[in-house]
């Protein structure tokens, strides 16, 4: 009788426990996971101590993740490493931007040095002082004005001549403490005394807008102006004592009222649209 | 059956399995003896039938709790419980008392419980990574090498040899 009870009990026990195992098997993972995490939390001290000892004995090998406590530790370490990585990435981005700024500044400085050195190659210009200015924008009707990033604080005053690509392109027409406006030679209100060297003739060049200028009433002494002939700015107050090329002849026509005189259409020798900076002639050196 | 000692023993084994046993590895850091498998075989061959069933499921529960092969529990509860019970039944027919037999029992149990656990994990459609060489050969083999030598201290700790000797003696007297 006793044996029969034990035998039956064993079977029932087996069935109950198998059923319990199946319940565990098909329970949601987050519920059984809580049980595993509870075990890891209750026995955290022996588990972590044992883990540290194990890791200390296997420093040359990568840590193996095999228990809930290990997973929790690994996740924590992973999170810390991710935070550290994000911080380093931010610093890296900042340093990259800083480096890019420094490189740009270096290139800009080098370009200015080259530009100024190029200006110094003209012996007479060695007596002049130039202020490099970056073009902020092009404004005015017919794109005939420039705004530059230098102003009164950089010794710019109204009336100073401005060079671009070693040619004269305009005059400072307005200044503020940190910026200045440059009226280009193509501006309709611009009037500059010029001379055509090959024709040995002079006149006043006035802008017509749309990137062109005209020299009216030029006595060419019976010579016909040729396209491409150079036009030079002549000596005026504040202008350096050397001729500076300013434009080139595009075409010309006789004055209908006086055939001896010519009206010559010119364009700047400098491609103003592609300029990024200009040089302002500050003053003659003593 | 001294259940308190059993509980402490299983708990210590579960903790050791996930900590200090990691220091004992051969060829590969993942190949290490399975202390709970050794306990399973020990209790399956030394306990009374009902105790063996409970002990087998309890050890499976501890195995799933301490070192889950998957993200959920159950595969090792069932596989340890079922095969522990079968081993106990088998032990009534074939005596597993010599060291080589014990080692063979541990090796075979290691293989079948590993395969059964993996197949049960498939029922959840969440199969875990399964290395045939590691789980079906190296780990059972290592456990089989170490296991029989642990049986003696385990028997002393659980006072099972004495119990069994008394039981055998009483049976002999009855005859």
Image (cartoon, coloured by chain):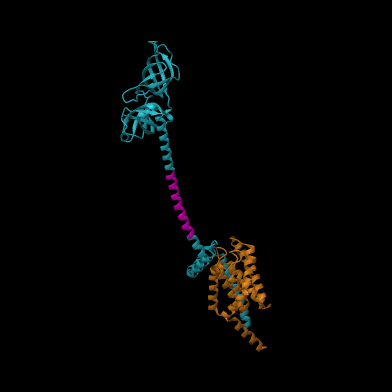
Q: Compare residues A168 and A253 and report the one nearer the observer.
A: A168
**Where, quadrant-wise, is the N terminus of chain A in this rendering?**
bottom right
Residue A192 spot, x, y in % from top left: 35, 22
Side of A84 relative to B64 (left or right)? left
Residue A248 spot, x, y in % from top left: 43, 21
Whether A141 is among the magenta residues is: no
Magenta stretch: give its range. Answer: A77-99
- Looking at the magenta stretch, what is its main secondary structure? helix
**Where, quadrant-wise, is the C terminus of chain A in this rendering?**
top left
Which residue appears farthest toward the right when viewing the image?
B94
User: Residue A93, can we see it?
Assistant: yes
Q: Compare residues B149 and A159 and report the one nearer the observer.
A: A159
Whether A88 is among the magenta residues is: yes
* Numbered circles on residues, count: 0
A148 up-or-down from A224: above or below: below
Chain that is cyan in the image: A
Residue A65 falls in image quadrant: bottom right
Residue B126 falls in image quadrant: bottom right
Q: Compare residues B44 and A223 and report the one nearer the observer.
A: A223
Residue A158 spot, x, y in % from top left: 31, 29
A253 up-or-down from A27: above or below: above
Chain that is orange in the image: B
Side of B62 relative to A170 (left or right)? right
User: Residue A31, can we see it?
Assistant: no
Residue A270 spot, x, y in % from top left: 42, 26
Residue in view at x 42 percent, y 40 percent: A106
Residue in view at x 45 percent, y 17 percent: A226
């Amino acid at each position: 009788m006793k044996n029969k009870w034990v035998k039956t009990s064993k079977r029932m026990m087996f069935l109950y426990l198998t059923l319990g195992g199946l319940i565990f098997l098909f329970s949601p993972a987050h519920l059984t996971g809580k049980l595993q995490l509870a075990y890891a939390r209750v026995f955290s001290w022996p588990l972590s101590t044992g883990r540290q000892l194990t890791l200390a004995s296997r420093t040359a090998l990568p840590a193996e993740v095999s228990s809930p406590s290990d997973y929790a530790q690994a996740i924590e370490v992973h999170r810390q490493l991710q935070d550290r990585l994000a911080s380093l990435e931010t610093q890296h981005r900042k340093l990259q931007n800083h480096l890019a700024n420094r490189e740009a500044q270096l290139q800009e400085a080098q370009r200015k040095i080259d530009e100024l050195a190029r200006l110094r190659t003209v012996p007479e210009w060695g007596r002049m002082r130039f202020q490099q200015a970056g073009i902020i924008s092009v404004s005015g009707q017919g794109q005939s004005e420039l705004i530059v990033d230098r102003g009164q604080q950089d010794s710019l005053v109204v009336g100073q001549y401005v060079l671009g690509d070693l040619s004269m392109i305009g005059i400072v027409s307005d200044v503020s403490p940190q910026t200045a406006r440059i009226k280009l030679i193509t501006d309709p209100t611009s009037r500059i005394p010029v001379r055509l060297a090959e024709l040995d003739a002079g006149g006043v060049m006035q802008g017509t807008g749309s990137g062109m200028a005209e020299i009216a009433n030029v006595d060419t002494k019976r010579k016909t102006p040729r396209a491409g002939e150079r036009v030079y700015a002549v000596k005026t107050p504040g202008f350096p004592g050397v001729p500076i090329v300013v434009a080139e002849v595009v075409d010309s026509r006789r004055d209908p009222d006086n055939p001896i005189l010519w009206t010559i259409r010119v364009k700047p020798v400098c491609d103003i649209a592609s300029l990024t900076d200009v040089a302002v002639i500050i003053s003659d050196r003593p | 059956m001294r259940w308190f000692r059993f509980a402490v023993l299983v708990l210590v084994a579960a903790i050791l399995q996930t900590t200090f046993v990691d220091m004992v590895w051969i060829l590969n850091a993942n190949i290490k003896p399975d202390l709970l498998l050794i306990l399973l075989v020990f209790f399956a061959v030394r306990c009374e039938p009902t105790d063996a069933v409970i002990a087998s499921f309890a050890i499976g529960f501890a195995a799933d709790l301490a070192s889950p092969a998957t993200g959920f529990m159950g595969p090792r509860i069932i596989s340890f419980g079922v095969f522990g019970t079968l081993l106990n039944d088998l032990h009534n027919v074939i005596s597993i008392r010599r060291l080589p037999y014990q080692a063979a029992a541990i090796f075979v149990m290691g293989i079948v419980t590993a395969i059964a656990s993996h197949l049960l994990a498939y029922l959840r459609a969440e199969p875990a990574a399964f290395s045939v060489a590691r789980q079906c050969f190296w780990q059972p083999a290592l456990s089989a090498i170490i296991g029989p030598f642990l049986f003696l201290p385990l028997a002393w700790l659980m006072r099972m040899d004495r119990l069994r000797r008394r039981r055998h003696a009483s049976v002999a007297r009855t005859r």
